[in-house]
């Protein structure tokens, strides 16, 4: 990501967000996969570089608005919104917060997984990465203007995915790099490349990150033989940690096939993980893990409760086991813990996970947001938002694929959908 032609303009949500990667160093507004990620290409149609860094940073003009045209409006739904096909758990309502039509065809447009992926917040503003369009988008307050674009020219990013804010800096994990900007109000400046040696390829290209206690934690999925190029393979199927300037790199944990969701909470690092595809429709379980330093989480030899993948697998004894086992192939991606006081006591503190949905299974599974009770240990998952997959539908019938979850201090939940290009809002009917 480079500084040239940086376009920055954003309104701020009235709510201050609790999760979604906003770090303690970022102030709120005063007063106020499976497989998913498996089908990207190393370069896009515009010739975007595959190393994730683009060409060297260039000085340029002051930031200018993303567009000179009149901005369409995106009206957020009331809490009693009645979505045409999505339903939420009792006491909650779901509606569309932003979609392609609301945004005048702009950065979200329908197609195969082109839309918003990971969500983060900065000073009360909700941001989303859109890897397939090489964009980062800020959503406006109350839908009063279009989603204003925070982006750089298409040739300067390669699939920005992971996003976090810390001490007034924006951190992005692209396909092959970690870069950061200094945030000056709503302007992103002073681009720095912190890491530039992550392998790139067509398989599990997503990179996710979290920041905790002065360290960056980067998750990268595996690359089967020959499907990735360049870089250091030690990043793959692992969580790697380094200082905020990219130095002092260490391997934090290994054996994680494709941990797309990663977040610190309650002093622990949590991650989702997507199991391998070729053990049948019901194996192996997808996972939610509490990731501990120095542990091996099994891939490629073991899954679940230390079960060998095949007769040629290595010894599984002593490998870390998942905190929660999920149905095979549901594809858990992003998640958030709901700490908002505005939520009912029965839901506060729980984990909400986007299940992106199966893509090879004959009978589809996933395609929903689940709630996993958490009070220091996990309870049994239950469905929280559903309807992306029609009853008796096939994978081709999916109306969307939830990718990430962000819970605001007001108790409202935002869910990204990278298939339909939509961000939904779920709220408690108070």
Image (cartoon, helix red, strand yellow):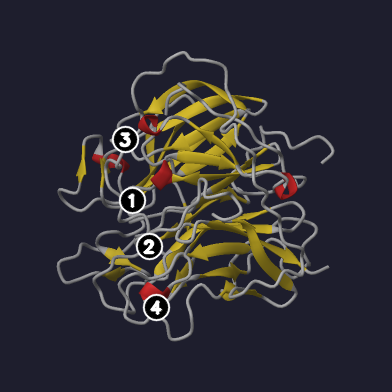
Q: Is residue 321 above or below residue 390?
A: above
Q: CA distance from mark 1 to mark 3?
A: 21 Å
CA separation in Å, label 3 and label 2: 27 Å
| Picture quarter with the N terminus | top left
Residue position marked by numbered label 3 in the rendering: 48
Q: Position of residue 238 (x, y in %)?
A: 35, 47
Q: Residue at x 29, y 42 (%)?
A: 45
Indicate which disc, 1 or 4, sits on the residue closer to the N terminus.
1
* Disc 3 + disc 2, Cβ < 8 Å: no
Relative horizontal placement of residue 48, taking residue 288 as reference (left or right) = left
Please tell me the numbered disc located at residue 316: none
C-alpha span from label 1 to label 4: 23 Å
Farthest-out residue, front: 69
Residue identifier under label 4: 364
Q: Which comes before the other along the chain, label 1 or label 3? A: 3
Q: Residue furthest top?
A: 59
- Mark 3 falls on what kind of element? loop
**Residue 395 vertical position relative to residue 130 in the rendered view, above or below:** below
Look at the numbered disc 2 and give the secondary structure of its residue. loop
SS for tag 4? Answer: loop
Q: Is residue 293 left or right of residue 143?
A: left
Instruction: State how many labels appear.
Output: 4
Q: Are marks 3 and 4 in contact (CB under 8 Å)?
A: no
Badge 4 crowding class, 10 Å Cα cut-off, few under 14, some 14 to 19, many 20 or more, is many
- The residue closer to the viewer here, 106 or 207, is 106
Pointers 1 and 4 in contact (CB under 8 A)? no
Q: Secondary structure at mark 1?
A: loop
Are the residues at dot 2 and dot 1 in contact (C-beta closer than 8 Å)? yes
């Amino acid at each position: 990501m480079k500084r040239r032609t940086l376009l920055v303009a954003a309104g701020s949500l009235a709510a201050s967000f609790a999760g979604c990667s906003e770090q303690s160093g970022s102030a709120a507004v005063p007063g106020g996969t499976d497989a998913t990620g498996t089908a990207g290409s190393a370069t896009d149609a515009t010739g975007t570089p595959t190393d994730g860094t683009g060409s060297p940073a260039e000085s340029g003009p002051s930031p200018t608005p993303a567009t000179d045209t009149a901005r369409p409006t995106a009206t957020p739904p009331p809490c009693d919104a009645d979505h045409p096909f999505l339903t939420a758990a009792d006491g909650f309502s779901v509606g569309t917060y932003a979609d392609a039509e609301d945004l005048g065809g702009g950065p979200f447009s329908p197609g195969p997984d082109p839309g918003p992926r990971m969500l983060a917040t900065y000073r009360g503003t909700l941001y989303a990465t859109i890897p397939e369009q090489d964009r980062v988008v800020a959503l406006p307050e109350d839908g009063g203007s279009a989603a204003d674009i925070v982006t750089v020219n298409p040739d300067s990013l390669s699939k920005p995915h992971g996003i976090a804010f810390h001490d007034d800096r924006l951190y992005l994990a692209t396909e092959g790099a970690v870069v950061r900007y200094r945030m000056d109000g709503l302007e992103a400046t002073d681009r720095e490349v912190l890491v530039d040696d992550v392998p790139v390829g067509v398989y599990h290209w997503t990179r996710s990150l979290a920041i905790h206690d002065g360290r960056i934690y980067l998750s990268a999925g595996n690359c089967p033989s020959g499907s990735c190029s360049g870089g250091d393979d030690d990043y793959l199927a692992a969580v790697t940690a380094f200082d905020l300037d990219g130095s002092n790199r260490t391997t934090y944990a290994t054996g994680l096939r494709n941990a797309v969701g990663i977040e610190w909470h309650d002093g622990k690092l949590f991650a989702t993980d997507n199991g391998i595809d070729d053990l049948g429709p019901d194996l192996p379980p997808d996972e939610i893990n509490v990731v501990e330093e120095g542990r091996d989480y099994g891939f490629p030899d073991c899954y679940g409760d230390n079960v060998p993948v095949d007769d040629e697998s290595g010894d599984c004894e002593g490998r870390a086991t998942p905190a929660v086992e999920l149905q095979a192939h549901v594809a858990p991606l992003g998640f958030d813990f709901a700490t908002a006081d505005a939520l009912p006591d029965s839901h506060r503190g729980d984990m909400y996970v986007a299940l992106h949905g199966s893509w090879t299974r004959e009978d589809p599974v996933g395609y929903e947001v689940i709630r996993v009770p958490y009070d220091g240990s996990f309870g049994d998952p239950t469905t929280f938002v559903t309807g992306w997959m029609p009853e008796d539908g096939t994978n081709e019938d999916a109306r969307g694929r939830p990718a990430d979850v962000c819970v605001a201090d007001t108790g409202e939940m935002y869910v990204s959908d990278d298939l339909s290009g939509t961000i939904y809002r779920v709220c408690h009917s108070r």
